[in-house]
Image (cartoon, rainbow, N blue to C red):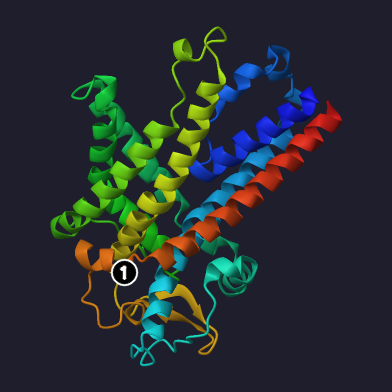
């Protein structure tokens, strides 16, 4: 029975970590492990299993990136297009809107197969190098600010937000690379700083950065002194579970709408004739940017984008997020089972 209880704790902890933490790597229920035997928590030598672990990690990374960013950006744009069609907007001039189209979150495999057939495997990762550059730049700036101006620990969230705003144009470039159908040919994309564009990104980037900083703060484990074996109690466990669900609520109801706003604003800076990865079955072609923003002044302001971030879009994104998490948990469970059999 003890082993069953430990497995239940482990599965519950990992599931909530993946669902609620910023990147599925959090330790939201770390306190629950205080009630497990220390021997059961000690890692074993898995040197011989390194290839399996590496392959599993790469596959999980591909799932997170493809579903968590590429398809999430496409879904955000598609939700605006479908909602405009249901309101009777005149969008047939360039996109061939089908009101009965199902959101991409409900046909992930079909959407991936369409993208693969038309553009190949590279279409999913042509913005990956920009993502790496963005995260390196943001992390470096945040670390520099934290080591100089915002040295106290409680000022670190401010450094995170400021670093997010500072590299907001890199995030825009990353999103545009992810939703555009243009292939990554040498010289086909050039990055340049535009002060007016950066000013338009300050508010949405700061808002999203604040939500991320709040989510990271909630996802932090309790201090070791507060979670020692001597003081461990079920009240600490209850607090850990409450914190996990609070993180899930913030991710779904705060971070998700702000991410929708930011994605819409970033995509609206693309040329209206730029072909996107939104596929129209009626036209049997990918749609240009102009058909996604009917009767909307481009680029979008934060106020206009905020009005488009409705609950339906957030629910579709949550559905896609859950599917991504289920795939990740299934792959992790399979890897764990293989390791158990081989040890």
Q: Residues within 10 Å of mark 1 (few under 14, many from 20)?
A: some
Q: Quadrant of the C terminus?
A: top right
Relative height, residue 234 to residue 301 (above, below): above
Please indicate whether residue 186 sits to the left or right of residue 266 in the image.
right
Residue 185 visible, this orientation: no
Residue 21, position in %: x, y?
48, 40
Q: Is residue 278 above or below residue 44?
A: below
Residue that label 1 marks? 308
Q: Is residue 269 left or right of residue 119?
A: left
Q: In the picture, residue 143 is in which quadrant?
A: top left
Instruction: Identify which residue, 75 or 117, lies in the foreground.
Output: 75
**In the displayed image of the protein, which residue is found farthest to the top?**
230
Give the residue at x 62% y 45%: 60
Residue 254: x, y in percent? 35, 50
For this view, does 177 lie left or right of residue 105? Answer: left
* Residue 286 higher or lower than 335, as above or below: below
Say whether residue 226 is visible: yes
Left of 107 or right of it: where is 279?
left
Quadrant for the N terminus, please. top right
Residue 130 point in image, percent of width and height: 40, 50
Residue at position x 43%, y 47% from top?
249
Question: In the rendered view, would you say 165 is above or below 231?
Answer: below
Residue at 57%, 10% in the rendered image: 229
| Residue visible at 50% across and 15% down in the picture | 227
**Outermost residue, right direction?**
341
At which x and y percent is residue 5?
73, 28
Q: Nearer the viewer, residue 298 or 25?
A: 25
Mark 1: secondary structure: helix
């Amino acid at each position: 029975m003890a082993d069953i209880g430990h497995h239940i704790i482990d599965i519950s902890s990992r599931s909530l970590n993946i669902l609620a933490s910023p990147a599925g790597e959090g330790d939201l229920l770390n306190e629950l492990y205080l009630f497990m035997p220390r021997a059961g928590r000690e890692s074993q030598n898995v040197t011989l299993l390194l290839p399996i672990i590496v392959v599993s990690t790469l596959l999980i990374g591909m799932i997170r990136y493809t579903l968590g960013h590429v398809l999430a950006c496409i879904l955000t744009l598609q939700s605006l297009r479908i909602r405009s069609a249901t309101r009777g907007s005149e969008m047939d001039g360039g996109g061939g809107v089908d009101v009965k189209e199902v959101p991409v979150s409900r046909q992930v495999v079909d959407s991936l197969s369409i993208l693969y057939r038309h553009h190949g495997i590279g279409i999913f990762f042509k913005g990956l190098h920009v993502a790496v550059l963005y995260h390196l730049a943001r992390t470096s700036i945040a670390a520099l600010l934290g080591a100089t101006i915002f040295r106290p620990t409680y000022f670190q969230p401010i450094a995170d937000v400021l670093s997010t705003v500072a590299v907001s144009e890199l995030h825009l470039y990353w999103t545009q690379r992810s939703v555009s159908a243009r292939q990554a040919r040498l010289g086909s994309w050039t990055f340049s700083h535009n002060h007016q564009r950066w000013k338009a990104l300050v508010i949405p980037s700061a808002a999203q950065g604040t939500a991320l900083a709040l989510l990271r703060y909630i996802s932090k484990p309790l201090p070791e002194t507060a979670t020692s074996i001597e003081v461990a109690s079920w009240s600490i466990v209850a607090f850990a579970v409450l914190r996990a669900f609070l993180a899930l609520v913030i991710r779904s109801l705060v971070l998700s709408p702000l991410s929708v706003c930011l994605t819409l604003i970033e995509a609206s800076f693309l040329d209206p004739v730029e072909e996107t990865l939104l596929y129209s079955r009626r036209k049997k072609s990918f749609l240009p940017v102009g058909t996604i923003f009917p009767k909307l002044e481009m680029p979008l302001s934060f106020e206009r984008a905020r009005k488009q971030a409705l609950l339906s879009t957030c629910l579709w994104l949550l559905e896609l997020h859950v599917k991504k998490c289920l795939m990740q948990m299934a792959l992790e469970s399979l890897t764990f089972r293989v390791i158990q059999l081989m040890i």
